[in-house]
Image (cartoon, rainbow, N blue to C red):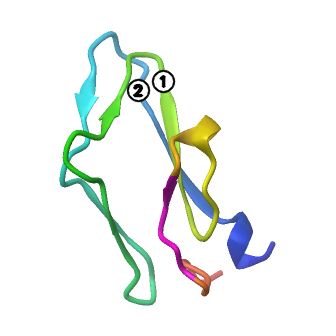
Amino acid sequence: MNHCDEYVEMANPGSAWIDLSGWCIKGAISQHFEFHSGAVLRPQGMVWVCANFHSPQTGGFSFNSHHALWRY
C-alpha cells in the first residue's frame, strides 16, 4: 500500500445528521485534519478522509499529505 491509498472512513448508521465542524483527525507524523465549519455526515452516510486524494464521491476530504499518515 502506498501513502496515497490511506484513508479514514467515518460512517453514520443513525437517522440524524452529524455536525462534523471542528472534528479533528491526527496522523502519526504530526499531520492534522480538521473538518471545516458546516461539514456534516448525513444519516446512513459515510465519508473518507484521504491521505492525498480528493474524491467528491467520498466527501472530498483530504489531509493533502505527501507522506504516510500511519506507521505500519
- Give the residue furthest to the top: 15
Answer with left or right where residue 14 lies relative to residue 29: left
Q: Is residue 26 left or right of residue 8?
A: left
Magenta region: 61-65
Residue at x 71%, y 71% (from the top left corner): 4
Q: Is residue 50 above or below residue 60?
A: below
- Point out the frontmost of discs 1 and 2: 1
Element type where label 1 sits in the image: loop
- The amino acid type of the residue labelled 2 equals Asn
Residue 12 position, x and y percent, is: 41, 26
Asked if residue 14 lies left or right of residue 52, the reply is: left
Which quarter of the figure is the C terminus placed in?
Answer: bottom right
Residue 11: give x, y in percent of width and height: 46, 33
Helix, strand or loop for disc 2: loop
Q: Disc 1 vs disc 2: Cβ atoms closer than 8 Å? A: yes
Q: Measured along the vertical axis of the image, is residue 70 above or below residue 30?
A: above
Q: Amino acid at mark 1?
A: Gly
Task: Report the residue marked by disc 2.
Answer: 12
How dense is the environment of label 2, judged by Cα within 10 Å: few (below 14), some, or many (20 and up)?
some
Q: Quadrant of the N terminus?
A: bottom right
- Between the residue at mark 1 and the residue at mark 2, the CA separation in whole angstroms equals 5 Å
List the residue tagged with mark 1.
Answer: 45
Compared with 38, 67 (above or below) is: below
Residue at x 30%, y 54% (from the top left corner): 35
Q: Is residue 10 magenta?
A: no
Residue 67 in the image: state x and y as whole percent: 60, 87
